Image: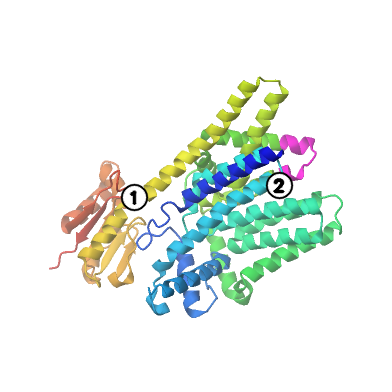
Amino acid sequence: MTAQNLRASRLGLALALLAAALLRFWALSQGIGFNPGPDEPEIMDRAVRMMKTADFNPRFYDYPGLYMYVETAVSTARFMTGAMQGRWSSLAQAPVDEFYLWSRATTAILGTLTVWVVYRAGMRWNGQTALLAAVLIAVMPLHVRESHYVLTDVPMTFVVMTTLLLSLRAHERATLGAFAVAGAAAGLAGALKYNGVLAGIMPLIACVMTPGLRTSRVTTALAVIAAMSAAFLAAAPYTLLDLPTFLNQFARLSSEYHKTPSIPGPIWLVYLKHLRGALDWPGSLMVIGGFAVALGNVYRGPDRLKWVLALTFPVLYFRFISQQAIVYARYLLPLVPFLSILAAAFVVAAVAWMRRANTRASVRDAATLALTVIAIVPPAYASINYDAGAAKAWTQRLAYDWIHRQLPAGSTIRLEGSLTPRLPPAYHPTYAKQLRFDPPGYYESHDVQYLVASSQCYGQYLDNRAAYPVEYDDYMRLFNDYEEVARFSPSPDHPGPELRILKVKRP
């Protein structure tokens, strides 16, 4: 790459990082205090507890401990900063909600840094592939959305891509130490989320495919496995220190993932639809083309390793998650950077083919621009739309504010569904899957004073009475029996479900 091209590539990277940061920090505070993301409290409650008690046993092993420890450190820094600003004079005065924004910012930073790691890994292909792949991951809506939450998927994706980069670097250096460092990175990926240990396949493949190793392949492979195990246990020590609890919870978690899926159709097809939604059709077709380019380069060589790694990890990981009964789009995140590299490689290969075919420069330039635009614009548009929507005052926010203004602390409130506001314990909230399942006399016997009904639950029944006559009657009875004191309907300025607040009448 010439000096001029290198400067242009670095400028492009800087712009990609800026775009990535803007998309990930925009609307970062959405839902804090009243509607956190699914599973965010599992990490935040434990991180703040560790800070307040110095008891670093998470006693929760749905996730390994590493990201909880990271957020404990971030929460400590947040508390010290707040104390210096006079916000509180003791740990007891600092509620968990005060720590969400800094913790989410940590995820957003790691999501942004992933763009840089993708670029560094992509440079093993060429500068054009590196830059286009970095831009693609910068605007990818699935990655943008999940970078707003205190969850393990974005940090794990960052470390998985770091493992790819270090595996390629180990292949170049062919030293035992370089392979051990790559193995340690895979161990940290596993300490963030268990399926991150699949990243360990990358340094092991690199070990097998690297000529001229300075030590034997067996010794190098053992060093990778030892470093991976040591890094995992160092980052999640209570996996071993509290072994019985870990094993019991791990067995329980594994059994949940092997239950009969609750969704219709094959899981792999559901995940493919999620990927198509994230990439849009043009990006999806480019990824398919990237797989074809990769297979061709694996067959022909030389320099096969980077192509083998770009193919093997996503295929292995996709098969792994497709065997699990619990399905979330965010589980696909570790695949997204690899797919970005493959899509970028296809675009570069298509341009190179046109050059070899002696296509006119003007036609080639127009085709290059068109391919780049149709790869970038649809996901960028989707990401901007997501952030713009998240930045609005949702109906949950309106209902939460109304409750705080109108209802005294100590009120007993029952809410349904997952899209209602989460209330502090001072309001004695309880939550139901659907209010219609509550038996007659339940509210009176449990001293429930207010109900919050959500169209997430009742909407489909009220919209289609003929298909759901029993459910329709249940909800209409609920709405007729109890006094409606507030209603928050969605609008372009206030998205979200319709929420009705009902007052339980007393005899």
Which residue lies at the image location 77% right of the left edge and 59% below the top edge? 178
Compared to 83, does 459 lie above or below? above
Please name the amino acid that badge 2 sits on. Answer: Leu
387 on left or right of 110: left
Callout 1 amino acid = Lys
Occupied quadrant, residue 221? bottom right
Q: Is residue 323 visible?
A: no
128 vs 312: above or below? above
Q: Which residues make up the magenta segment?
A: 295-308
On the image, the x and y values in percent for residue 414 come to: 28, 64
Image coordinates for residue 328, horizontal then vertical, percent: 50, 51
Left or right of residue 8, residue 327 in this image = left
* Image spot of residue 112 (x, y percent): 55, 52
Q: Is residue 418 magenta?
A: no
Residue with the mark numbered 1? 392
Left of 395 or right of it: where is 270? Answer: right
Marker disc for residue 419: none
Give the residue at mark 2: 309
Residue 177 relative to residue 272: left or right: right
Determine crowd level at label 2: few under 14, some 14-19, many 20+ residues with C-alpha closer than 10 A. Answer: many
Q: Pick out the residue farthest to the left.
A: 507
| First reached walking from the N terminus: tag 2 or tag 1 | 2
Mark in front: 2 vs 1: 1
Q: Residues within 10 Å of mark 1 (few under 14, many from 20)?
A: some
Picture quarter with the C terminus = bottom left
Is 112 situated above or below 340? below
Where, by quadrant of the figure, is residue 9 drawn?
top right
The colour scheme is rainbow
Q: Residue at x 50, y 75 (%)?
A: 50
